[in-house]
Image: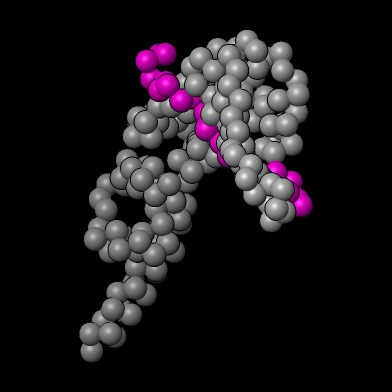
């Protein structure tokens, strides 16, 4: 599984809290934590300030509460918690799997499980509400998908089509057909 993870495990950036305009970047690799910072100021004494970089091994970072506090201030507490887990070699392998593979696995879940999975992370929220997933779910649950259903899916999305009852769906397709016929006439 370790081969699925590239050299850079996490990359995040942000701006310091107001009134500061300073920019920060956090990079966690397999071996070290890199904290980069750029001083951005209109004041003349800071105009010649060069960007800075702090590099620490995972072990050094685990003991550096000052850097952890600075990262929490600029990014957030959850990023610090996540970086601490990464430095302890607690990798989240699911986050690094290709979306196509994750969609394939999600297709085998019950709908209730898909709903719960969508609440676990932003990545899974995006995947669980993607048109790619819901198109395949509709294909698996329907005998045939008509060209009219495909056209309607571009307007309302596959998820909406799946949760729309058949009578309502037929009515929407009929309206769509009438609208297109009126445009031709």
The residue closer to the viewer here, 5 or 49, is: 49
Q: Is residue 59 magenta?
A: no
Q: Residue at x 39, y 68 (%)?
A: 172
Residue 148 falls left or right of residue 41: left
Q: Is residue 185 above or below residue 94?
A: below
Residue 5 locus on image (x, y percent): 42, 21
- Which part of the image, by quadrant, shows the C terminus? bottom left
The magenta stretch spans which residues?
Answer: 1-22
- The residue closer to the viewer here, 18 or 174, is 18
Q: Position of residue 135 (x, y in %)?
A: 35, 47
Query: Residue 122's image quarter?
Result: top right
Q: Nearer the viewer, residue 122 or 171?
A: 122
**How many tags in the picture?**
0
Q: Is residue 11 left or right of residue 157?
A: right
Which color mode does the image show? one colour
Q: Position of residue 9 (x, y in %)?
A: 49, 24
Q: Residue at x 64, y 49 (%)?
A: 47
Where is the N terminus found, in terms of image quarters? Answer: top left
Residue lying at 25% horizontally and 50% vertically, measured from the top left: 144
Q: Is residue 101 above or below residue 59?
A: below
* Residue 99 appears in the picture as rendered: yes
Image: 174 above or below 51? below
Would you say residue 119 is visible in this rendering?
A: no
Front in this rendered view, residue 93 or 111: 93
Q: What's the residue at 36%, 59% (across, down)? A: 153
Q: Is residue 14 magenta?
A: yes
Residue 151 point in image, percent of width and height: 30, 63
């Amino acid at each position: 599984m370790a081969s699925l993870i590239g050299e850079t495990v996490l990359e995040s950036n942000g701006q310091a809290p107001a009134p500061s305009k300073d920019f920060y970047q956090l990079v966690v690799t397999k071996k070290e934590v890199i904290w980069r910072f750029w001083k951005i100021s209109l004041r003349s004494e800071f105009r010649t300030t060069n960007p800075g970089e702090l590099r620490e091994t995972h072990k050094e970072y685990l003991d550096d509460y000052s850097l952890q506090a600075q990262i929490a201030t600029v990014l957030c507490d959850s990023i610090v918690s996540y970086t601490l887990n990464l430095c302890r070699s607690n990798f989240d392998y699911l986050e690094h799997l290709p979306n196509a593979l994750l969609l394939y696995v999600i297709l085998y879940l019950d709908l209730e499980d898909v709903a719960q999975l969508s609440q676990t992370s932003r990545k899974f929220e995006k995947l669980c509400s993607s048109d790619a997933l819901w198109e395949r779910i509709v294909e698996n649950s329907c005998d045939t998908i008509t060209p009219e259903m495909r056209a309607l899916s571009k307007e309302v999305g596959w998820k909406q089509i799946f949760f729309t009852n058949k009578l309502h769906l037929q009515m929407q397709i009929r309206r769509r057909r009438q609208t297109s016929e009126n445009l031709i006439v």
